[in-house]
Image (cartoon, rainbow, N blue to C red):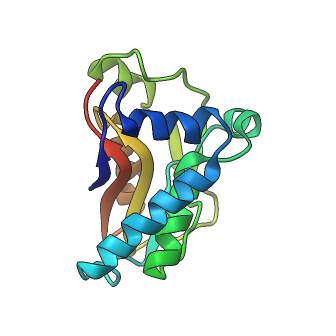
Amino acid sequence: MAFLRFSKKGNSQKLLHQLKYRNKPEIGEEMGRLYGLSLALQGYQDEWDVIVPVPLHPMKQKRRGYNQSEVFGKGLSKALNIKLENLLERKKFTETQTKKSRIQRLDNVDEVFDLRAGENIEGLRILLVDDVITTGATLCACANVLLGYGAKHVDLATIAAGGQ
């Protein structure tokens, strides 16, 4: 599921650039809140036990000051009244995916994510959130980890979806 359709040089790209590169985390949280309200109106508020953001590498998060997927998740969490938990960790630093092909993206995120030590997610219904989905490589890698550790099911939600 996606809140917006991504279009190059369109409003969705402008919003995402403000969120990711111009220190505007409030944009992500507000989009999450608005999307969460829309999902609640459609009866989705009881579909998930937990919202899980795609993690950033600690180095990248320190540089940016926040995780854009997490602030989007916070807005969703507030609107849907579902807890947000950072259950995943990024084990490796990866290059940006923006200029990579689908195959390169899949290779770039292979074995990058894992469940945080000590977490038990068996039987949980998880809403996995990220800022944008293009090929789905990152979300797929994260979902596979969650399912591998026993999640009942994993649904995906992003701020925007679309191709290059």
5 to the left or right of 92: left
Quarter the N terminus occupies:
bottom left
80 versus 144 height, above or below: below
Q: Can residue 41 be seen in this view?
A: yes
Tell which of 71 and 90 is nearer to you: 71
Tell which of 37 and 155 is nearer to you: 37
134 versus 156 height, above or below: above
Quarter the C terminus occupies:
top left
- Name the residue: 28% across, 78% down: 44
Q: Can residue 111 be seen in this view?
A: no
Tell which of 65 and 31 is nearer to you: 31
Q: Where is residue 97 in the image (x, y as percent from the top left)?
A: 44, 23
Residue 127: image quadrant is bottom left
Q: Position of residue 107 (x, y in %)?
A: 38, 23
Q: Where is residue 104 in the image (x, y as percent from the top left)?
A: 35, 18
64 to the left or right of 28: right
69 to the left or right of 42: right
- Name the residue: 68% across, 47% down: 66
- Name the residue: 28% across, 23% down: 102
Q: As drawn, which residue projects farthest toward the front?
A: 11
- Name the residue: 29% across, 32% down: 7
Residue 48: image quadrant is bottom left
Residue 101: image quadrant is top left
Q: Position of residue 148 (x, y in %)?
A: 37, 56
Report the number of discs. 0
